[in-house]
Amino acid sequence: MTAQTILPANTLSGGYDVANSVRLFSNTFLHKTPTGDSNKQVFTFSTWLKRGNITAEMGIFTAGNDSNSNGFFTVMFTDADELNIQFYDGAFDDLKTNRKFRDVSAWYHIVVAVDTTDGTAANRIKVYVNGVQESSFASSDYPDENQNFDINEDANDVYVGVRRNSGGSPAGYYDGYIAEAVLIDGSQLAADQFGEFDSDSGIWKPIDVSGLTFGTNGFYLDFQASGNLGNDANGGTDLTENNIVATDQSTDTCTNNFATLNILDPVQSDATYSEGNLKWATTTNGHFFWGRSTIGVSTGKWYAEFKATSIAEHSYVGIVNNGPVIAGGGGAATTTGAYEWAYKTSDGQIYNTDGGSSYGNTYGDGAIIGVLLNLDDNEISFSKDGTVQNSGTAVSITAAASTPHGFYFLAVADGTSGTSATFEANFGSPPYSISSGNADANGHGNFEYAVPSGYLALCTKNLAENG
């Protein structure tokens, strides 16, 4: 089996495996108070992350408060999507990349390594992205020699997933996924202490960091304990979770990247995305459009589940080839295109090319709709709460190679004016609690219902192992 895809970057199937990440969004973060004073001049922060949103300020790591009267230190994204290291050394200064970080389907590795004792200003803060040291900056302020920051200090918490404003309250919550978050106290480390370039592909990938020297107040967050996602795997004081629950643990990581819904699609002003772009809610504008997966496929057998959390008369689950807007646009609730197949809530019909035909049962709030996309045999089936509809008989679809774009996306849609709809997508890393738990034949994914024989979760390990 082969698969073609819009493949999210920096994901490999071999080598060291990262098992888990944490899914963060508004008002979720981790923090802890250091056990005492240690090194305030030399430290390194490293993390892998996949963004859930863009064009918004997002704190990744902060020590101290964002106040011009203290020596705070913050790693964040700006609302223009640059990576920005902000700090205070007698005045507010920052180091800001020219590079933009706008790919919500890719995992990035970011290292910020600090040594203010270095006599060369440009060496006092080094920034690495995917193994390469950044050299192009929109602003390039560097701290004074021997500058102390409010890090590794008994009175000042450190934060992951948020920055702090001058009043000490949270601001700029991170939206997306974070894996392998590491603070090294007392050493300025290069990126090759946390990752390496794959010898075959040249792609940057993680390595095992458990043998590093973390120092007095350093920590290592591997997010493997679902009941304690702030657990310091190095054995130090755990970080405290703020509004983080067990379902915020994810298997979407830098070594196995799962599909999400794509917040970068056009027309998405009519929808809101949350829970790491797995929860999709329409507004009441009545524009009929798809919310699509970030990964598109052309061959193979793929399975996903969509929870109909709160749906309307004209809500759909299906596949789409030619873009986020159903052909014809507007509020027409049955205006499907030639390369779109959709299973509708209110009548149980399957729609394609502007018309519906009898297929299965209707479904309402709480139903879990499975999509069985078989691109080896060019057919699609849908299940409702684990039961394949239409007595198990699949519906023929156009071969992906014969479509305008050559691949299909899994998707949800809504076209009801005046009534909003909400779906939660599970491509194998669910945003909601699973009562049973079922993986595919390769051991990937976590689904409510048994994955049909031969079908796989939509993730990069399955693409690589079957490509």
Image (cartoon, rainbow, N blue to C red):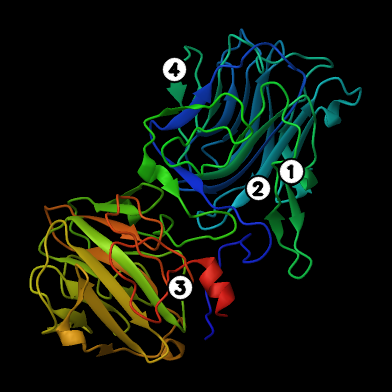
Q: Which residue is mark 1?
A: 128
Tag 2, which secondary structure? strand
User: How crowded is the residue under tag 3: few (<14 C-alpha within 10 Å), some, or many (20+)?
Assistant: many
Nearer to me, 165 or 259: 259
Q: Which residue is mark 3?
A: 296
Tag of residue 169 = 4
As drawn, is 129 to the left or to the right of 335? right
User: Label 1 amino acid?
Assistant: Tyr
Which is more N-terminal, label 4 or label 2?
Answer: 2
Give how far apart the Cα atoms at labels 3 and 2 are: 24 Å
User: Label 2 amino acid?
Assistant: His
Nearer to me, 108 or 450: 450
User: Label 4 amino acid?
Assistant: Ser
User: Label 3 amino acid?
Assistant: Gly
Tag 3, which secondary structure? loop
Which is more N-terminal, label 1 or label 2?
Answer: 2
What residue lies at 69% left-to-right and 41% top-to-bottom? 210
Which is more N-terminal, label 1 or label 4?
Answer: 1
Which is more N-terminal, label 2 or label 3?
Answer: 2
Give how far apart the Cα atoms at labels 1 and 3 are: 30 Å
Give how far apart the Cα atoms at labels 4 and 1 are: 29 Å
Tag of residue 109 = 2
Give how far apart the Cα atoms at labels 4 and 3 are: 41 Å
Residue 26's image quarter? top left
Residue 123's image quarter? top right
Name the spot of residue 191 as percent of width and height, x first: 76, 44
Which is more N-terminal, label 3 or label 4?
Answer: 4
Give how far apart the Cα atoms at labels 2 and 1 are: 8 Å
Whether residues under marks 1 and 3 lie with C-beta atoms below 8 angstroms apart, the answer is no
